[in-house]
Image (spheres, rainbow, N blue to C red):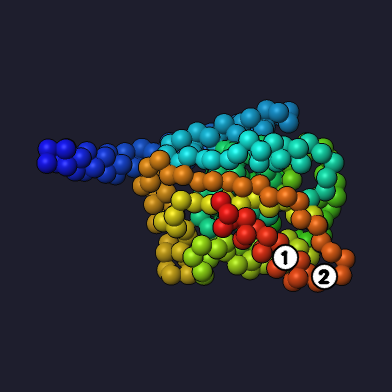
Amino acid sequence: MLYQLLYKLYCILKTFLIYVTLPIRVFLVYLIFFIGVYILHFLKKDNDIKYCVLTMGKMMLYILSINIKISNEDYIKYMNYLYSEEKYLCVFTHTTLVDMIVLFGTLPKCGPIMNKQNEFKYILYDENISDKLGGILLDRSKMGGTTEIMKKKIEARKCGQAPLCIAPGKGIPPKIPGNISNFKGSGAFVNKTKILPIIIKYQDDSLNYNEEFGESMLHSYLKVFLVENYNITIKIGDIIEPDEKESVEEYKDKVYNIMNKDYKNI
């Protein structure tokens, strides 16, 4: 009886502290991001950029109380592909607003393909930072030629350079629980590039960004700060190669099915 009472008091106190410290943790995460991006503007050496991004990501994940699990085998697999001459595109599952922080804090050198946002100017994220990360910053008002830009970037990639990373699911939660999100776009598959799957699996769906159900971006961001010891698993798949005879849609479906199978096996 006493144990149950003490445990209830502990849970109440823990919940109270989570909410009380919320403004401080929000401030610290954005401060770390802002300082990290600011420092990146002055870094030129590849290793300095890599460790700056990794440190920034790990610090934010620590404050968010998020634990990342990735096997040594999968980490080595990612590094072997990174330091090879292989021309490939990373495709990752994307359902929350912290997926890129998860990648930045876990895998060295991820080149994000992002749409340019007006808010980026307030956090100093511009074409210069995108280039240093090895990514592409797309202007939605000038969307023509995106696949050609991706193709050139992938073909020009050299050993040790960041691979491009894209999320065909576009941040929309899966329609069927227990599966990955449906691939909405075909841009990742148009060029018939080799695909390196990166599967991100959350311990539950509480952090999903439910925009289609009216959830605001602010609410989705804030709920990330309300978790404690939250577990996320990352799985690196094997390179998927296109078949010359298959269509873009068939290639997209093939990649989806392979990644969905890996997701269910985690």
Picture layout, residue 126 above or below residue 151 = above
Answer left or right for 111 relative to 9. right
Residue beneath the point at 82% across and 70% down: 246
Residue 195 visible? The answer is yes
Residue 94: name its quadrant: bottom right
Q: Residue at x 58, y 40 (%)?
A: 70
Q: Position of residue 248 (x, y in %)?
A: 78, 69
Coordinates of residue 218 in the picture (x, y in percent): 42, 55
Q: Which residue is at 49% across, 65% downward? A: 177
> Label 2 is placed on what type of residue?
Glu
The reply, left or right, for residue 238 in relation to residue 10 is right
Q: Which sits in the foreground, 3 or 69? A: 3
Q: Secondary structure at mark 2?
A: loop
Q: Which residue is mark 1?
A: 254
Sequence-wise, the earlier of marks 1 and 2 is 2
Q: Which corner quadrant of the image does residue 41 belong to?
A: top right
In the image, taking residue 187 as reference, residue 218 lies left or right, namely: left
Q: Secondary structure at mark 1?
A: helix
* Residue 246 circle label: 2
Q: Amino acid at mark 1?
A: Lys
Q: Nearer the viewer, residue 197 or 193?
A: 197
Residue at image x 52%, y 40%? 68
Residue 124 in view here: no
Q: State yes or no: discs 1 and 2 in contact (Cβ < 8 Å).
A: yes
